[in-house]
Image: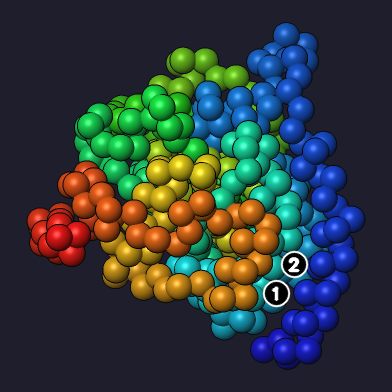
């Protein structure tokens, strides 16, 4: 177990290194024409809008990731080769809070959203964790969510994203249905399974550029993007995705190789973000989210990372929106709606 003084020293070293590396975001955000007639490289905001995701390669150095990873493992009590997951990571770990306020992840998200992001508290620390089933992380996940607020964005743009930092990655990858963030309807799971079973999904490997314009045909098929240590993946929370692994340019069943990630959720300052925050903090009670530490709340406020409406519960004023939310046990939804409706008076 790493000693507390060692963790403090490591965090000081990380702080000095991170200040020198803040320019990394700027060198990763350009949009260029395709080399040799290939598909053009997209700026983060364009890639997020068109494809539902964007990647910041090597935003953190391997040395930084090793130090951050060691500190997080010490704080969480993570043991080698033993799977570990923890929600509400910034409430639980000082190093997760350091990574949040350090700046590079926030800057990357801002370049993708095109405006100042707000932190929505949602965050996970995962070690050797893969969710193999295709899913969305958004509030509304019905087979047809056409009437759900996540897709009512004509006047108020949806801009809720998850940023995942890969602290360890031997063959870690993300399965992605590019463009699925734009459709409120269920993906064609049978077709996707056939493509994956045949090994015909597009693999974006270490030497490939993930921030590129995809054809309509490519968006109809699943892809697997392979992560390297220090990469940050930013994706629209409505996008279908799944944990995958890639070895030698092909998707593999080897899930024992190193994979260690920290995810943080951000959003534009509007009702979509208020809804996302309130959904995880108040509606999904089984997850156990709690109020953030006052010192972190103050830091976030000083840095402009707090929603204008603060940390209030969106659903106390809008209980009618609860009828669209996803619950693991859907039978609990009527009682939840009644509880909020009565509380509103």
Question: In the image shown, does 36 or 182 lie closer to the viewer?
Answer: 182
Q: Residue furthest top?
A: 37
Question: In the image shown, does 205 or 153 lie closer to the viewer?
Answer: 153
Q: Secondary structure at mark 2?
A: helix
Q: Residue furthest front?
A: 345
- Label 2 Cα crowd, 10 Å radius (few <14 / some 14-19 / many 20+): some
- Label 1 Cα crowd, 10 Å radius (few <14 / some 14-19 / many 20+): some
Q: Position of residue 44 (x, y in %)?
A: 65, 32
Q: Position of residue 240 (x, y in %)?
A: 40, 38
Q: Which quadrant: the C terminus?
A: bottom left
Is 292 left, or right, of 135 in this rendering?
right
Asked if the residue under mark 1 is in contact with the one under mark 2, i.e. CB atoms within 8 Å, the reply is yes
Q: Is residue 222 visible?
A: no
Question: In the image shown, does 45 or 211 lie closer to the viewer?
Answer: 45
Q: Position of residue 141 (x, y in %)?
A: 28, 42
**Residue 72, picture quadrant:** bottom right
Question: In the image shown, does 8 or 296 lie closer to the viewer?
Answer: 296
Alpha carbons under labels 2 and 1: distance apart: 6 Å
Disc ID at residue 66: 2
Instruction: Indicate whether 270 appears above or below 105.
Output: above
Q: Which quadrant: the N terminus?
A: bottom right
Instruction: Indicate whether 178 appears above or below 170.
Output: above
Q: What residue is shown at x 45% (from left), y 73% (from top)?
A: 291
Q: Position of residue 301 (x, y in %)?
A: 62, 61
Residue on which the image places disc 1: 70
**Colouring mode (rainbow / by chain / secondary structure / one colour):** rainbow
Q: How many marks?
A: 2
Instruction: Indicate whether 94 appears above or below 205.
Output: below
Q: What residue is shown at x 70% (from left), y 46% (from top)?
A: 107
Disc ID at residue 195: none
């Amino acid at each position: 177990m790493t000693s507390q003084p060692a963790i403090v020293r490591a965090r000081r070293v990380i702080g000095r290194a991170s200040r020198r590396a803040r320019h990394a975001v700027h060198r990763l955000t350009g949009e260029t024409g395709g080399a040799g007639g290939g598909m053009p490289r997209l700026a983060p905001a364009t890639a997020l809008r068109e494809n539902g995701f964007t990647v910041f390669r090597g935003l953190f150095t391997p040395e930084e990731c090793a130090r951050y990873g060691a500190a997080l493992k010490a704080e969480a009590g993570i043991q080698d080769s033993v799977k570990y997951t923890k929600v509400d990571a910034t409430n639980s770990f000082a190093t997760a809070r350091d990574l949040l306020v350090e700046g590079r992840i926030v800057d990357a998200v801002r370049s993708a959203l095109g405006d100042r992001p707000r932190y929505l508290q949602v965050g996970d620390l995962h070690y050797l964790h893969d969710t193999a089933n295709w899913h969305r992380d958004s509030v509304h996940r019905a087979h047809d969510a056409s009437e759900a607020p996540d897709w009512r964005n004509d006047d108020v743009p949806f801009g809720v994203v998850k940023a995942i930092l890969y602290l360890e990655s031997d063959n870690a990858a993300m399965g992605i249905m590019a463009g699925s963030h734009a459709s409120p309807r269920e993906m064609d799971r049978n077709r996707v399974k056939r493509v994956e079973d045949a090994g015909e999904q597009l693999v974006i490997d270490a030497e490939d550029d993930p921030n590129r314009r995809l054809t309509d045909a490519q968006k109809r098929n699943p892809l697997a993007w392979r992560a390297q240590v220090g990469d940050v993946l930013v994706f629209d929370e409505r996008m279908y995705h799944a944990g995958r692994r890639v070895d030698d340019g092909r998707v593999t069943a080897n899930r024992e190789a190193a994979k260690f990630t920290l995810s943080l959720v951000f959003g534009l300052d509007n009702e979509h973000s208020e809804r996302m925050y309130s959904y995880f903090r108040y509606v999904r009670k089984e997850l156990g989210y709690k109020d953030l530490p006052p010192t972190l709340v103050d830091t976030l406020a000083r840095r402009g990372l707090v929603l204008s409406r603060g940390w209030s519960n969106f659903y106390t004023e809008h209980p009618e929106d609860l009828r669209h939310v996803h619950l693991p046990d859907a039978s609990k939804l009527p009682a939840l709606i009644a509880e909020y409706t009565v509380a509103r008076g």
